Amino acid sequence: MSKPLMARATAVWLVDNTTLSFKQIADFCGMHELEVQGIADGDVAAGVKGFDPVGNNQLDAIEIERGQKDPLYKLRLKFNAAAVGEDKRRGPRYTPLSKRQDRPNAILWLVKFHPELSDGAIGKLVGTTKPTIQAIRERTHWNIQNMQAIDPVALGLCRQSELDAAVQAAVRKKAAEGGVMSDDERRKLVSTEQSLGMSTEPKLPDSLAGLDAFTEVEKEENPADYSDAESFFNLPHGDDEEEDDDHR
């Protein structure tokens, strides 16, 4: 775990009970230095009760002493075997405030170009809610007229590898459920680099290709030439000639 439990409450306690610098507290709690300064000024975390990291076995007192003596010293969090894996992200992805206004455009792009993705998959990719996705799908979103479809990777809302993994999982799920995959969906089962190198020409099914080959062979074996209309209507009739000979 890279930061202590209840990081903001821990920062409040360190600001109130130590002489550590704002940068030292920010680095230890995984916060921005200005946010720690805001806590000291009373503009941030007003009403938050401090959380003692020493009493809760997250920080040794000796670490605080070293940090107070040396402003460049970085506090080290105590190892807790029970907390291993706690920093793994759960639930929807957190999106910075500066990028939240771009989420509708990213959702519109995903709905348009990747309709196989479920609402849950889109929510995990860009950190949004199902009602918002449904409103954009049905074009009932309040700002739908001003939206532009923009790739979420270009917006920095997710990584290309995460998008590829989500699309491939959706296509595999559709195939497992018995759905018919299009050529475009088959491309999504391979990597982006391989897909870009594939031919865009549609391929005929094997059965149709065999039918064309059979037709060509039949034409060669039974040629039909109707270029001479006179020879077509004046075909020789062997039986009529024999009858004329008998009458004679």
Image (cartoon, grey):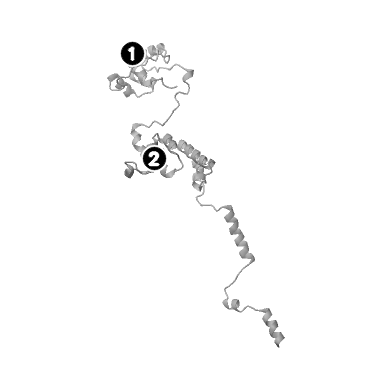
Q: The C terminus lies in which quarter of the figure?
A: bottom right
**Residue beneath disc 2:** 134
Whichever of labels 2 and 1 marks the residue nearer the N terminus, that label is: 1
Instruction: Give the x, y percent position of residue 225.
Output: 59, 71
Q: Is residue 25 above or below residue 157?
A: above
Number of marks in picture? 2
- Label 1 CA crowd tier, 10 Å (few <14, some 14–19, many 20+): few
Residue 36: image tag? none
Residue 17: image tag? 1
- Label 2 CA crowd tier, 10 Å (few <14, some 14–19, many 20+): some
For numbered disc 2, what is the local secondary structure? helix
Q: Residue at x 60, y 62 (%)?
A: 216
Instruction: Give the x, y percent position of residue 120.
Output: 44, 36
Camera-side residue: 58 or 66? Answer: 58
Can residue 175 be seen at all in this image of the molecule?
A: yes
Can residue 155 be seen at all in this image of the molecule?
A: no
Three-letter code, disc 2: Gln
Mark 2 → mark 1, Cα distance in angstroms: 49 Å
Q: Is residue 146 above or below residue 45?
A: below
Q: Residue at x 34, y 32 (%)?
A: 97
Q: Nearer the viewer, mark 2 or mark 1?
A: 2
Instruction: Give the x, y percent position of residue 166.
Output: 47, 37
Instruction: Give the x, y percent position of residue 206.
Output: 58, 53
Q: The N terminus lies in which quarter of the figure?
A: top left
Q: Residue at x 67, y 81 (%)?
A: 240
In the current view of this chain or complex, which residue is farthest to the bottom?
248
Q: Splitting the image into 4 quarters, where does residue 178 fall?
A: top right
Three-letter code, disc 1: Asn
